[in-house]
Amino acid sequence: MIALFETIDMALNLYTWIIIASAVFSWLYAFNVINSSNRFVASLGEFLYKVTEPVLRPIRNILPQMSGIDISPVILLFIIFFIRRFMWTTLLPMVL
């Protein structure tokens, strides 16, 4: 059972880094730091968008408009942190 919890925790940790990479990529893209016409950059941006947008969209729909500031990645990171803590401190002791 611990192996299952560790696998879920590792997947959530990986997704956390993907969310952070997506946020940084969007900032670099918005400020024209990276070349958007580069094929690798475009494919990386498309991958990050497709992986994170299905989870971020419902959060954006719930949050009020904040004059161009998107805090949905931060909210999602808090949710993931809560799930990881809840899994290790509450669920695992109940199972063992």
Image (cartoon, rainbow, N blue to C red):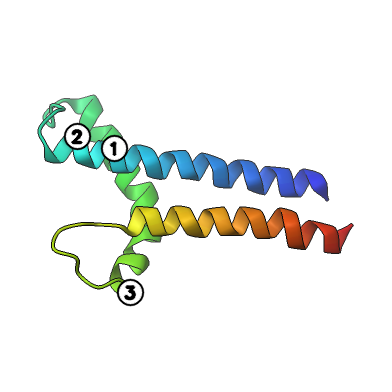
Q: Is residue 73 above or below residue 34?
A: below
Query: Of callouts 1 and 3, which one flags the residue occurring earlier in the amino acid sequence?
Result: 1
Q: CA distance from mark 1 to mark 2?
A: 6 Å
Nearer the observer, 58 or 62: 62
Numbered badge on residue 13? none
* Residue position for label 2: 28
Going by the numbered disc 2, the residue's amino acid type is Leu
Residue 59 relative to residue 27: left or right: right
| Disc 3 crowd, CA 10 A, few/some/many (<14, 14-19, 20+) | few
The residue shown at (68%, 43%) is 7
* Residue position for label 1: 24
Percent position (x, y) of residue 92?
79, 57
Going by the numbered disc 3, the residue's amino acid type is Ile
Percent position (x, y) of residue 1?
83, 51
The residue shown at (16%, 37%) is 29
Quarter of the figure that contains the C terminus: bottom right
Q: Give the SS element for disc 1.
A: helix
Q: CA distance from mark 1 to mark 3?
A: 23 Å
Numbered badge on residue 62? 3
Percent position (x, y) of residue 88?
73, 53
Q: Give the SS element for disc 2.
A: helix
Circles 1 and 2, Cβ within 8 Å, touching? The answer is yes
Percent position (x, y) of residue 14?
52, 39
The residue shown at (62%, 41%) is 10
Going by the numbered disc 1, the residue's amino acid type is Val
Residue 53 relative to residue 28: left or right: right
| Disc 1 crowd, CA 10 A, few/some/many (<14, 14-19, 20+) | few
